Image: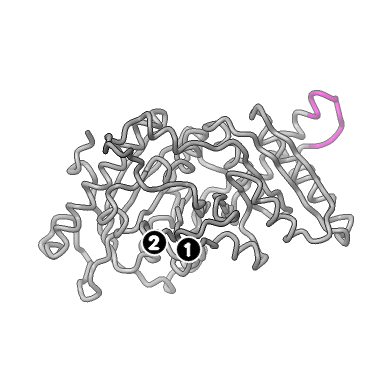
Amino acid sequence: MTDPNSIPVTVCAETNRDSAPVGDRTQHSPVAAASYKLLVPIPEQTTTKYGNINAVRLLRTPCSIAADRNGSVTITTILNAPSDLSLVDVAAGDEELSPLESLITTARERIASIVEDVASIYPSVSVHGSVVVGHLIENVVEQLTATDRYSGLFIPRSEDTETTLWDRSIIDEIVDTASCAVYIENLGEYSDIQRPEDSSGEEFTGENRASSNGTSDILLAVGTGTHSVLGAETARAIARHSGARVHALHLYSTTTERQVKAGGVDALSVCEYVLSDVPNVTCTSREVEHVVDDLLAEIEQYDVAVMGSPTEQPLLDRLFATSRRGEPTAESSVSIIMVRQPNDAMNTVYYRWKRAIERTIEDESSDSPTEESN
């Protein structure tokens, strides 16, 4: 059993967000680090009020990503300190935090329980827990992700009336300020994040935890933007864990210019390379009348859909859409994962360069890897 006292508690004092240039907050290396570290913030009310959450389902995606990249997951609860409580020069255990002592104790117990559950299912993943005390959640997350300490930020989302997670306004603020990779998963209606139990009240064990991992079909929406490689890596990670099939799909309009079409075919080719070691993968490029409408319809045919950070409002609305509890709809059954690559990431260049090297060796081509990556 994970000892709650082993869960570290840290304090994040407020900083002037406008005082530092953006460049000083974007210090991530241009190439993904060898050790991929994911931060998963969980709302205070979730860990304190809902000790019966199905943490294995909630954290399936970040753990799959970490397992795929030989990385780690840190599960963090952020406690909101009263606005009149100054946190400058305050450390864990200081007298100033005594009004929060009960909340801190409960949060450490819940995080320890979550770490225990998740680590038992993902033994190959290094799973950690922490409790952070701060004022504004978005400010705390910005500080935690401002340097190379974490490679990615995973935000689970649900509007289930019994298990409320992050709402859209906070997510928008976090996404705007985080300089690392960002993953947002809107859990489908049938992705039960309540701890399963039968009528006899049987304890939640490894056997019934496994039911949270049922994924058979994954849609990877491939665009021409900068996020396609990260999306492909995410689909690959989930497929490796679940044994699911992956369909990489690029849609383009009948009015799309030839150069843009070529870019889409190239993006699909790069994603195919990323997915090359997944057993069951299909890659398709298709011309349609209305790209967004057809993609929205396509999404509903899968268990999980992965897409890059969308710019079209209907896709954003779908990402954050949920139905009222007790009114299941077709669209609410699909879990949607949105990924956003940090601006300075070079993963796409890396894959292009590697592919060019392989073609050169195999075909004795005169193509230059340097020219390919420019």
Q: Residue at x 58, y 44 (%)?
A: 303
**Which residue is denoted by mark 1 in the rendering?**
324
First in sequence, mark 1 or 2: give its number: 2
SS at mark 2? loop
Q: In the image, what residue type sits under mark 1? A: Arg
Q: Which residues are magenta?
A: 359-368
In the image shown, does 139 or 296 lie closer to the viewer? Answer: 296
Q: What sort of colour scheme is used for the picture?
A: one colour
Q: Is residue 242 above or below residue 113?
A: above
Residue 20 x, y percent position in the rendering: 44, 69
For this view, does 139 lie left or right of residue 250?
left
Within 10 Å of disc 2 (Cα), the crowding (few <14, some 14-19, many 20+) is few
Q: Residue at x 60, y 61 (%)?
A: 318
In the image shown, does 130 or 329 lie closer to the viewer? Answer: 329
In the image shown, does 274 or 114 lie closer to the viewer? Answer: 114
Queried whether the magenta region covers residue 363, the answer comes back as yes
Q: Is residue 92 above or below residue 173?
A: above
